[in-house]
Amino acid sequence: MGKEIERKFLVKDNSFIQMTTELLHICQTYISDKPEATVRIRVCDDHAWITVKGKNDGAVRDEWEYAIPVNDAMEMAERLAGGWNIDKTRYVVIYEGARWEVDVFHGRHDGLVLAEIELSSASDSFVLPPFIGDEVTGDPRYYNSVLAAHKQL
Amino acid sequence: MGKEIERKFLVKDNSFIQMTTELLHICQTYISDKPEATVRIRVCDDHAWITVKGKNDGAVRDEWEYAIPVNDAMEMAERLAGGWNIDKTRYVVIYEGARWEVDVFHGRHDGLVLAEIELSSASDSFVLPPFIGDEVTGDPRYYNSVLAAHKQL
């Protein structure tokens, strides 16, 4: 089991684009979106995973992740979830030695931009990049599982 | 994706025991039990799997299965499902060239015995062993996901 410890923020301007070192295309969907145990299927470029996550405890969450064939992921999305529910471009920004992932959502959630930093301990300190807005860690409206299931924010 | 094609029967006597060629101990639980997409965690002796299954269409069901570390399975059962919900001994019987799996349930479902045969096509013919009782294929009361979630039959 891994522990996912992440903090999530709104993004207030586009300055992250010029700071980007890596660009990924992510499609994902949920075959279980109940908060006690979400099961996510994700394709990121030419890799795919099935990921099980427990309930959030502040910024901390249990996580188990397994690589799977991309074809399996496509089939599960199609046959179990009626297609991908989240389609986003991930801009990776390294700022003051820390890795930030800025997700620009497409489709139903077009216009939504969220930035996340993954920490090794909930008490890790870090420097906020200039594009970071309000913190939304733990706000269920911004869980990807909730975005996948529901309407636009 | 695999296709799981199986037929399930009640068992009317214990004659399967003397016909058994292999004995396995299985613990399993469900982190999603919605019929459109069940997610099962299983430990069978010293191996473990995460298995995603689609909705039943008669005896046929989509299935995706991945081997995972036994430790991960134990953690998921404990942290996401409050422990194992199904504990059974599997008696494997080869009869007239076909493999039958007879599951003897313990704990909450003590006394329940179900036999299954896995087919490569829904139209495959096979010979019923003498211990086979009424067919319950497609009867939701005998889905393992339903047995895991609910009370005794």
Image (cartoon, coloured by chain):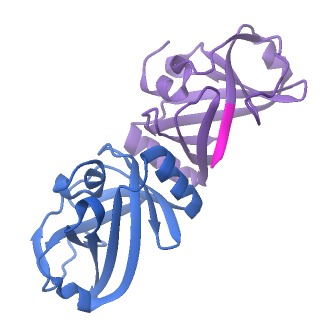
Chain colours: A blue, B purple
Magenta segment main secondary structure: strand
- At a point 59% along the width and 48% down the height, the residue shown is B64
Residue A48 visible, this angle: yes
Q: Furthest-left residue in view? A: A134
Tell me where residue B23 appears, x and y as whole percent: 75, 31
Q: Furthest-front residue in view? A: A107
Q: Magenta segment, which residues?
A: B1-5
A21 to B114, vertically: above or below? below
Left or right position of B23 against A24: right
Q: Is residue A99 magenta?
A: no
Tell me where residue A114 appears, x and y as whole percent: 21, 70
Quarter-of-image position of residue B97: top right
Q: Furthest-right residue in view? A: B96
**Viewer-proximal residue, A90 or A53?**
A90
Quarter-of-image position of residue A13: bottom left
Tell me where residue A130 appears, x and y as whole percent: 12, 86
